[in-house]
Image: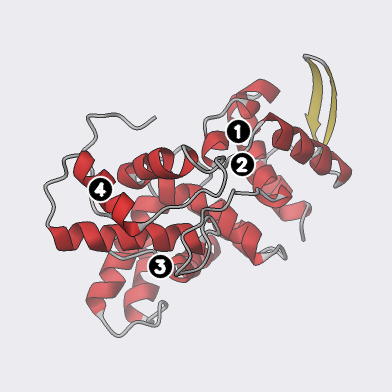
Amino acid sequence: MVSEAVKFQAHLVRGGLGLEEMKRLLLAYAECGDELEVKRRAFEDNLLGKTSKRIVEDMFYAFRRRFLSNSGLPSAELVGMFLKLPVPEAAKNQVLFPYFIVTDPLAEKCYRDLVLSRVNEPNPQLTSKEVREHLEALSLKWSEKLKERWSRGFLTMLRRFNLMEKSPKKNLKKFWLLPEPFAFFWLWFWEQGGSFWSAAEHPLWELLQVDGQRMEELLVEGQLKGWWSYQRSGSIVDFQPRFQTLREWLENALG
């Protein structure tokens, strides 16, 4: 949960969403494993294809905050390895989505309050005006222009991650997690916690809108794909991964 003491910042305005640019930086990081080398490529080799140094600075700042911070999620190198695999683009985007949320307290707060709270309602919708009003309710001492820019950026983020219909429509869409992103995070949580329940009860699943039924479906699908062995009878669970680490799964399961 987001602490009420957190100082909310307008991260979505600085550097914007930059989804494709984040992918380029992640692929470069997976290749060299060195932040300074990725930075050099961004600024000297124009890795991001930008004409403004200020834009490159903002995007690299966003990259460091999202993927090189201590978020508790898989490392930037592992994300980059996933991006290189022959999986659907939608699956790649779903792996990136949590990094945009958990590293930005204001985005997470608005996602929980404005999206998760209403996505299961009949015909859920969200407008820029509602986002702006929510920012005002949070007592942010921002200019009206900044509130408007951030609100538009938030809706853009939802649309890019397929959580909202294309503009000018206002309808929210449920997040339907695909098997590959599920396995990516599940195996990481298993690796960190060492148990089925430590993985199953991780708070990330709430952000990814994975309820008990969908989790069961994804676990069964992962077994059918040969990623793990899974059987369940009531509260008794037998789960054994076929790969000991997430890295091993990335190197062997999807190539």
Separation of marks 1 and 2 at Cα, in angstroms: 6 Å
- Residue marked by disc 2: 185
- Give how far across and how far down residue 79 sits, in percent: 56, 54
Q: Which residue carries the number 4 mark?
A: 133
Q: Secondary structure at mark 2?
A: helix
* Residue bearing mark 1: 189
Residue drawn at (35%, 68%) of the image: 39
Q: Which residue is mark 3?
A: 18
Q: CA distance from mark 1 to mark 3?
A: 27 Å
Please tell me which residue lies in front, 179 or 117.
117
Where in the figure is residue 47, as x and y percent of width and height? 42, 78
Disc 3/disc 2 C-alpha distance (Å)? 22 Å
Q: Is residue 165 above or below residue 210?
A: below
Q: Earlier in the sequence, mark 4 or mark 1?
A: 4
**Mark 3, mark 2: which one is toward the viewer?**
3
Q: Is residue 17 visible?
A: yes
Helix, strand or loop under label 4: helix
The earlier-in-sequence mark between 4 and 2 is 4
Q: Name the image quarter holding residue 189.
A: top right
Answer yes or no: do the residues labelled 1 and 2 have beta carbons within 8 Å?
A: yes
Is 30 situated left or right of 86 in this image?
Answer: left
Q: Earlier in the sequence, mark 1 or mark 3?
A: 3
